[in-house]
Amino acid sequence: MLLKLTLEALEPISIGLESTGIKMLLYRMPVVTPSGAVLEIPVIPGNSLRGVLRDAMAIQFLSDVRKHQSNVSIHAGTALSLFSGGILARGEEAGVNAKDLDRLMKEYVQYLLPISILGASIGKIMIPSKIKVGMGYPITRETDFLVNHLIINHLISSPNSTPSLEDILVSVLMTRKDDRAKFGQLADLGIQLSELDKFLEEAGGKREVAVQQRFEREAVAPGTKFVTYIRELLPLTNPEKGLVLETLDQLSSVGGRIAGGLGEFKLTILDGLLKSDKQQARNAYIKFIKAQSSKIAEALKKNPQKV
């Protein structure tokens, strides 16, 4: 399976690399062009996309299980495996044998599809990921040689309307007000505020009124399209493919300052599966959840270090 995807920025997208003064710089990747020139291109790292995919997939999976199991509880270790990929154990414990690994897969991993798909560290065992999430490259005049192999046969935009790298870069000014300026509103409501000066002193704050804080973030302009892909590394079952497709429908943001109005995008699957195959995979996933919901609930309760 190879799913070709475009992400169209609906808001500025800002994936930061480092700060210089009050400005957060974009994550850029050096790319060698066919002419031999080196360009610094703003990209969406595959790991950033993979991170939002993992979170969304865990929520999607748990929400669907909840439809068939009214009381669902989850062990903290399993939650870490679902949302963060688990914790790789350290120490001098004995190695895991084939029998232990087989039991782990049969009693635990096969029922927890996000772990089966994206992998996790369970004790000293590394469950490999079945999919690769590619780097997201912006579609610009300078990057056509990088993206053409993914968007061939798909009309993204006419050559005349394709932006340049310079066109897609913006700087977003953001502010953070001094919250103490709002405390006067409490008095208007008849609410007393106690020990403000003492609290600020203990917290290392300043008693004098602070100026409004301003900072900037480099970002990619709304309307910019990125192209990326999800490739199957190990064979996915139909229920696993269905969960991937269901999760992609939920992806909507990436990068920093999402709560502050950045990062929203629209995802489109350009190619990868026939419409009939997509529906078959989604149906297989729904059937799997319904048939295995009780065993999934049991697996969710388990401590992955003791399976």
Image: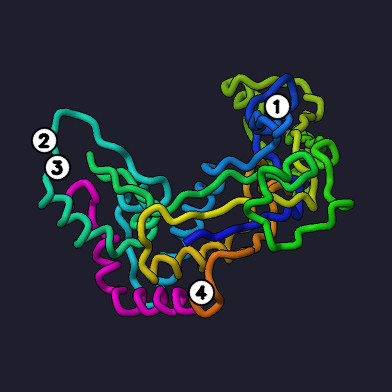
Q: Is residue 296 magenta?
A: yes
Q: Amino acid at mark 4?
A: Lys
Foreground pick, 25 / 64:
25
Disc 2 element: loop
Q: Residue at the location (77% across, 31% down)?
A: 216
Asked if residue 203 lies left or right of residue 233, the reply is: right
Q: Spatial distance from mark 4 to mark 2, Cα to Cα? A: 43 Å
Q: Determine which residue is flagged by label 4.
A: 278
Q: Nearer the viewer, mark 1 or mark 3?
A: 1
In reply to whether residue 182 is colored magenta, the answer given is: no
Residue at mark 1 to residue at mark 4: CA–CA distance: 41 Å
Q: Earlier in the sequence, mark 4 or mark 3?
A: 3
Cβ–Cβ under 8 Å for marks 2 and 3: yes
Label 4: how many Cα within 10 Å (few below 14, some 14–19, many 20+): some
**Mark 3 lies on residue:** 96
Which amino acid does the dot numbered 1 rest on?
Gly
Q: Which residue is at 75% across, 24% downward?
A: 22
**Labels 1 and 4: the sequence-earlier one:** 1
In the rendered structure, which disc, 1 or 3, sits on the residue that comes first in sequence?
1
Identify the residue position indicated by label 1 in the image. 36
In the rendered structure, which segment of residues is drawn in magenta?
A: 278-307
Q: Secondary structure at mark 3?
A: loop
Which disc, if any, is residue 94?
2
